[in-house]
Amino acid sequence: MTYIDDILVYSPSYDQHVHDVPNNVLCKYLYCKLEKCEFHLHKVNFLGYIIREDSVSMQPCTVEAVTRWPQPRTHTELQRFLGFVPFCRSFIQPFSTLARPLSNLLQGKAPHLRWTAFTRLKKAFTEVPVLQHLDPSQPFIMETDNSDVGVGNVLSQRAGEAKLNLVPDFTKKLNVAEVNYDVGDQELLAMKLAFKE
């Protein structure tokens, strides 16, 4: 995975990693500063996430940044907050429902600021789960739900007898036409979007 000047490389085995990484770097004419490189890590901080062999979680500094975010006083400050939090939407269920009152305010659809929505969204960041990587050899359990404002799904897999491992989920705010769907159609929309995701 490449983001601007950060590169994260994963390989299924140590031997393949030792072979593939140098070859790819050389073939693409990339230059690396050794003092900025880290090799053979089992845990890495990357783009606000802590990525391990078996899971992904948010970095504590990211959670702290959101929980310490001051209440927006202007339209621009609210835009800044709503521009920052969506990168963690797969950790927060139901993100769209929690964020909708704030986005409605930006669109002029709400008469006044909803501090409860702002507080609930910030609180959701303190309760975020650790997401497990998908295991294609195990069956998936998909749960969908809908409300008046959005649809969402949670995808999980069994780990042992009773434990469910959460893998990335999503929520989506309904558009004007989708709000008018009946409950069954909204549930189907959630499933369709989950498979597409």
Image (tube, rainbow, N blue to C red):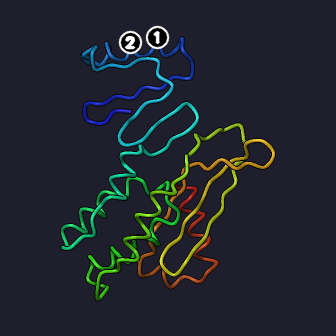
Residue at which label 2 appears: 23
Q: List x then y, in percent, for residue 9.
A: 42, 26
Residue at 33% across / 16% down in the picture? Answer: 25
Residue 169, image quadrant: bottom right
Which of the two residues, 40 or 24, is positioned nearer the viewer here? 40
Height in image: 40 above or below 132? above
* 108 to the left or right of 56: left
Residue at 61% across / 80% down in the picture? Answer: 183
* 9 to the left or right of 134: left
In the rendered image, the quadrant that contains the N terminus is top left
Within 10 Å of disc 2 (Cα), the crowding (few <14, some 14-19, many 20+) is few
Q: List x then y, in percent, for residue 75.
A: 20, 73
Residue at which label 1 appears: 19
The answer to the question of whether label 1 and label 2 lie on touching residues, with beta carbons closer than 8 A, is yes
Amino acid of disc 1: His
Residue 50, image quadrant: top left
Give the secondary structure at mark 2. Answer: helix
Residue at 47% across / 57% down in the picture? Answer: 126
Residue 188, image quadrant: bottom right
Give the secondary structure at mark 1. Answer: helix
Height in image: 24 above or below 98? above
* Badge number at residue 47: none
Amino acid of disc 2: Asn
* 32 to the left or right of 19: left
Height in image: 53 above or below 70? above
Residue at 44% across / 46% down in the picture? Answer: 58
Which of the two residues, 123 or 91, is positioned nearer the viewer here? 123
Within 10 Å of disc 1 (Cα), the crowding (few <14, some 14-19, many 20+) is few
Q: List x then y, in percent, for residue 27.
A: 32, 15
Q: List x then y, in percent, for residue 48.
A: 37, 43
